[in-house]
Image: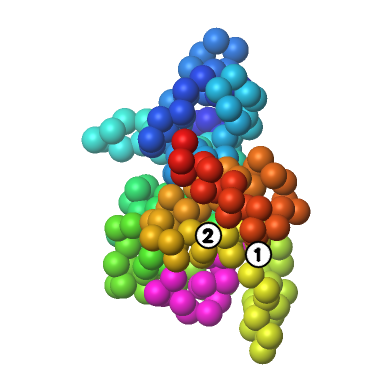
Amino acid sequence: MIGRLRGAVAEVGEEDALIDVMGVGYVVRCGARTLSRLPEIGGEALVHVETQWSEQTGTTLYGFLSRDERRAFVMLRAIQGVGPKAALAVLDVLAPVELASAVARDDKALVARAQGVGPKLAQRIVTELKDKPLHDGPVAAFHAGIAGPKPAAPSASGEATAALMGLGVAEPSARRVVEAALGRLGEDAEPAALIKAALQELGR
């Protein structure tokens, strides 16, 4: 079983990437969020891999840029009715820490924003992921932090994504271009700068 790949990004498609590891090309299925954060062609990537097999498709490698994302994918796939496509769609909409927050608040509407995830499946996801360690931080401390009366201030990337959605950009596309802009400008970028850079990404 392949658990991790380190190699050059050879190709990036709409649903997968080709990672060249010492001359061997591995096709890795990824969500839009992951694909948008990969290095440019020729750049080195470290991809955490979940290997799955089915009679219909054979062996498929699913790639993520963090262990938390891979862990969340595995937990989502363990839920009845959640296939790989739906699991990737959830992680396109919600990073693991955001998914943990939604689960802790029983916010099935937020989970249902993922493409292909209806209200009933979203409720099942929220119910079955209760108290599951979706990220490396202590679950209890994280839950206590989000349960207080004062909500956390939105991140710059969150503000930029919301602004693009207000302009009519679909949420997956908004998140993708904001992630790309964040990669160019750095973690300390202001929302206004992120919005401008993300709009430039959309125009490419």
Eyeballing the image, is 183 above or below 110? above
Q: Residue at label 1?
A: 155
Kind of residue indicated by mark 2: Thr
On the rendered structure, is 143 left or right of 24? Answer: right
Residue that lies at the very extreme toward the left in this rendered image: 56
Eyeballing the image, is 11 above or below 71? above
Instruction: Kindly identify the residue that appears in the image at 70 percent across and 58 percent down.
Output: 190
On the rendered structure, is 197 left or right of 89? Answer: right
Residue that lies at the very extreme toward the right in this rendered image: 188
Query: Is residue 61 in view?
Result: no
- State the extent of the magenta-drawn residues as a range: 97-110
Q: Is disc 1 placed on a helix, strand or loop?
A: loop
Q: Quadrant of residue 165?
A: bottom left
How far apart, in angstroms, are the residues tagged by discs 2 and 1? 10 Å
Instruction: Kindly identify the residue that appears in the image at 39 percent across and 60 percent down.
Output: 168
Q: Quadrant of residue 104?
A: bottom right
Q: Which mark is residue 195?
A: none
The way the protein has been coloured in the rendering is rainbow
* First along the sequence among labels 2 and 1: 1
Kind of residue indicated by mark 1: Ser
Q: Residue at label 2?
A: 161
Label 1 crowd bin: few (<14), some (14–19), many (20+), radius 10 Å: few
Eyeballing the image, is 157 above or below 40? below
Q: Position of residue 72 (x, y in %)?
A: 52, 55
Query: Is residue 36 in view?
Result: yes
